[in-house]
Image: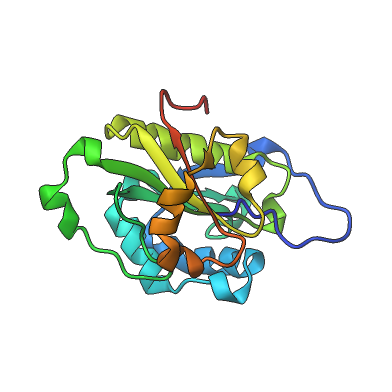
Amino acid sequence: MRPCWGAAGGRSYNPPMTKFTVRPMVLTDLPSVLAVQASCYTEGLLEGETALASRLALSPASCWVAEDPAQRGTLAAYLFTHAWPEHSLPPLDGVLDDGWRQHAAPDSLTWFVHDMAVAPAGRGAGLAQRLYAAAQAAAHAAGLRRSRLVAVQSAAPWWRRLGYAPVPAQMAARHAGKLAAYGASAVLMERTLARPLAG
């Protein structure tokens, strides 16, 4: 989704990269995750705690947050990612289960980058790249070699810089129903995962 840098307008504060701790997400982070989400997305893209909790449960090793150690429990950024069947697209704000795992071969799965957001307090600290690198390493260790995401709110150019490209039109058309929930400007993108990014 979108690496949101927070609200526009005014002179931004650029905190040092060392200020924030990047760590795996835990269930008790979700209230703070919702606060960051609300600062970054339009109302139509907001997801509920139950939907986000299901994504965390699906892949706790590849969901990460950035926290300010001086303000324990206050998050500056988060990232939800998980494995998903390649032929499908997870619904926005839907509760996911792992029933598909029973019959899924590793080469039929993709690493789905569901949602990344950076609050105003985390702007300029390189948090999006750090979160992505941590989650990608976990995905690569799990044997995933392809990645897919839905870029929203005009974020496609940012994801291109990480190696993503729009999927073929025929594939996008196949997922048109679920893509519509992400907004008119949503772009389904994919890339191969040859090796993890450096952290």
For this orientation, the residue located farthest to the front is 170
| Residue 64 appears in view | no
Give the residue displayed 60% in from the left and 66% down from the top.
184
Q: Is residue 47 above or below residue 195?
A: below
Q: Quadrant of the N terminus?
A: bottom right
| Residue 84 appears in view | yes
Instruction: Measuring from the top left, give residue 144's x and y in whole percent.
Output: 31, 35
Instruction: Measuring from the top left, give residue 192's x and y in whole percent.
Output: 42, 31
Q: Is residue 182 left or right of residue 119?
A: left
Who is closer to the viewer here, 91 or 6? 91
For this orientation, the residue located farthest to the right is 10
Q: Splitting the image into 4 quarters, where does residue 153 fall?
A: bottom right
Q: Is residue 65 left or right of residue 155?
A: left
Q: Is residue 193 above or below residue 30?
A: above
Who is closer to the viewer here, 123 or 114? 114
Give the residue displayed 28% in from the left and 55% down from the top.
58
Q: How many marks?
A: 0
Q: Is residue 98 above or below residue 161?
A: below
Q: Is residue 169 above or below residue 179?
A: above
For this orientation, the residue located farthest to the left is 102
Q: How is the image coloured?
A: rainbow
Q: Is residue 31 left or right of residue 14?
A: left
Give the residue displayed 23% in from the left and 63% down from the top.
97
Who is closer to the viewer here, 154 or 77? 154
Instruction: Measuring from the top left, give residue 71's x and y in whole percent.
Output: 61, 57
Instruction: Measuring from the top left, give residue 18's x and y in whole percent.
Output: 65, 36
Give the residue displayed 32% in from the left and 64% down from the top.
54
Who is closer to the viewer here, 57 or 25? 57
